[in-house]
Image (cartoon, grey):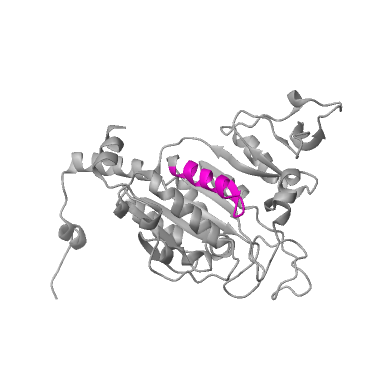
Amino acid sequence: MPEVAEQQSTSPKLTVKDFQSDQDVRWCPGCGDYSILAQVQRVFPEFLHKKENYVAVSGIGCSSRFPYYMNVYGLHSIHGRAPAIASGIKSLNPELDVWVFTGDGDGLSIGGNHLIHMLRRNLNIKTVLFNNEIYGLTKGQYSPTSLVGQVTKSTPMGAIDYPFVPVAVALGAGATFVARTMDRDPKHMQEMVRRAERHKGSAFVEIYQNCNVFNDGAFFAYTEKETRDENVVYLEHGKPLLFGKQKDKGVRLNGFTPEMVAIAGGEFGINDLVVHDEKDSTLAVILSNMIHNPALPRPMGVFLAVERFTYEDAMQDQIAKAKARKKEGELQKLLDGDEIWTI
């Protein structure tokens, strides 16, 4: 920790304004992206990095305008390739704080292959995925997270694809930190961004984000104050899965199957409920699949937070060992190879 303390004392304290660019924010009025941008800009000054060490990388889509609006180094890349580009940046300079901002279309469709391999390698990169269950930038086609039966411009008779569950994809890919939050719960979103930053390894945060033009209200049962308490269970490490306005409902496991139970005067008590454990990967998968049962509340919070060696640390270790064994090489000799000739 001495390095952090020294950095904190010698670097000027950053503020929200330091992360606001001079670009006009060009999302539709009422878009949930505004909230995400505001919370990220509020939290970034807490991280103690030098400003020049922040990097924001995106692909294509409404979410991918993010680097324009963050006054940090950034790259608005090509469709779906943000994870590959971010991996290169982090591998070349592990000291940088690299963030990927993507959407359910950009990250899980054309970019799905790049995303899963970045997560499984456990690069210390933070991925924020905006999920609005629709393609917004291209005007309302269905996406990999659109629901079965959802009517869109490209599915006029209803989608027949079975959707991805983003947190389940991240868990399956081997991400070491996986969380979910929502655009209309600013304090919770800020805490998830903080948790992702503090984690050393591949961090994935899904954010339920309302597209008020092409898929308005997709998450209102979970995001609105009037309905949130009855439909959302917040995941807190070491605490039971308790929810409801009166905290009179909970989630128990019947074998490996989660069930909603009443605990006020019923046959079940608080001791029968699942106690959340961020280190339990099996429980994380069970919780991620609660989305398939409409009778169950939607989990919000950290599903998994475990430690594993990072890709860039292992790579730097191999480079150091190779240099110690073979000394510094010469690039031109490497390019020439063992056999050269002149024509």
Q: Camera-side residue: 283 or 190?
A: 190
Q: Residue furthest left?
A: 342
Image position of 176 (left or right of 158): left
Residue found at x 30% / y 43%:
316
In the rendered image, residue 163, in percent from the top left (x then y), is placed at 69, 58
Magenta extent: 180-197
Q: Is residue 193 part of the magenta span, yes or no?
A: yes
Image position of 194 (left or right of 75): right
In the rendered image, residue 296, in percent from the top left (x then y), is placed at 77, 43
Q: Main secondary structure of the magenta part?
A: helix
The quarter of the picture where the C terminus appears is: bottom left
Residue found at x 41% / y 49%:
44
In the rendered image, residue 70, in percent from the top left (x then y), is placed at 41, 61
Image position of 12 (left or right of 218): left
The quarter of the picture where the N terminus appears is: top left
Q: Camera-side residue: 197 or 229?
A: 229
Task: Find residue 19 and report its image quarter.
Answer: bottom left
